[in-house]
Image (tube, helix red, strand yellow):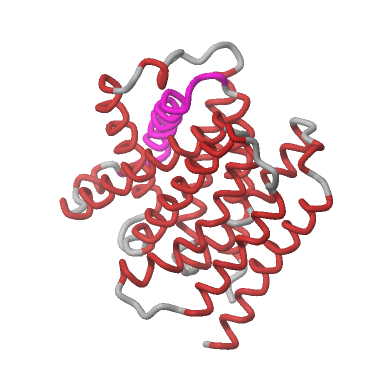
Amino acid sequence: MHLKPYIEIHIAVLLFGLTAILGDIIRIPAVSLVWWRVLITSISLLLIINKLKQILQIPKRHLLFLSFIGCLIALHWITFFGSIKASNASITLICMATASFFTSLLEPLIIKKKVNKIEVLYGLLVIPGMIFIVKNLETYQLLGVFLGLISAFLAALFGIFNKTIVNTIEAKQITLIELSSSWLFISLCLPFLPKVWVTPFLPIGTDWLYLIFLAIGCTTLAFVLTLKAMQYLSAFETSLIINLEPVYGIILAFLILNDKDELNNEFYIGVTLILFVVFTFPIIKKKFK
């Protein structure tokens, strides 16, 4: 078993967990936040990719497919940050834990493989952990849950699509094409969106610093690490490890935001269940394989 891809994916998930904290801190709306995020990320990728001519040589069908994935990523992030704004970072992160369940159902349909009952079972086992961590929600937080579940569904979808092409094109090139497509997609939609979704549009003060770190650290670096790891891990296995995002995220919220309210007994039960699912899956998978 290769250790490096597991280290890469866990570093990426830690950065993804930090994304929710920054999304809570940055004061501009979700759509504007994502627009700036993908713009800064695309510029950073342009600076580190030397062979741009290779991108022009990628077959058109691959470019169109990656652009489509980029649109899914844009919608995923908008619903992700929208969920945070409607509820809080912890609820959004827990909703993201359902991504593995969506992956276990969608992957057989998309890549035409037989339904793996073990994957479906392990996907379902994440849900009790999610319920233990987030309980007694207020009515106004239900919109956040709804948006969070949509975001998890979209994450599962583009994760599967990425798995089908990740061994064909270099990870950095995939990231640049997808995220620049995300930026273009949002830019085309901006004139038709309600003003309340995008106002204020310009970041203020320290928001710029948070946005730059969000774009370069939590996006560019995290995406490249994820795509590199996916060359060795299955889409479901990747999705399952990403379930640690709420664990990392809530712990980071405790350390950075001093969010002690989330760390109760039910939190520890939920964390234990999610960790059990994540770390026992490779063993069970190997045994049944």
Residue 70 placement (x, y as % from top left): 33, 44
Determine the image quadrant of residue 276: bottom right
Confirm whether the magenta stretch covers residue 217.
no
Q: Residue furthest left?
A: 60
Q: Of 119 and 160, which appears nearest the observer?
A: 119
Q: Residue furthest bottom?
A: 288
| On-image quarter of the N terminus | bottom right
- Please state if 270 lies on the left or on the right of 6 as rendered: right
- Please state if 102 lies on the left or on the right of 95 as rendered: left
Residue 61 in sight: yes
- Please state if 185 lies on the left or on the right of 198 as rendered: left
Q: Please give the name of the residue rendered at 50% of the width and 68% of the height, measured from the top-left corner.
A: 233
Q: Of 273 and 217, which appears nearest the observer?
A: 273
Q: Please give the name of the residue rendered at 32% of the width and 36% of the height, measured from the top-left corner.
A: 180
Q: Of 110 and 265, which appears nearest the observer?
A: 265
Residue 168 placement (x, y as % from top left): 31, 62
Residue 220 in sight: no
Above or below, 285 relative to 255: below
- Please state if 275 lies on the left or on the right of 116 as rendered: right
Q: Please give the name of the residue rendered at 38% of the width and 67% of the height, measured from the top-left corner.
A: 107
Residue 228 placement (x, y as % from top left): 47, 58
Q: Please give the name of the residue rendered at 44% of the width and 51% of the height, measured from the top-left corner.
A: 155
Above or below, 66 relative to 27: below
Q: Of 191 and 217, which appears nearest the observer?
A: 191
Determine the image quadrant of residue 185: top left
**Magenta segment range?**
27-51
Above or below, 262 relative to 269: above
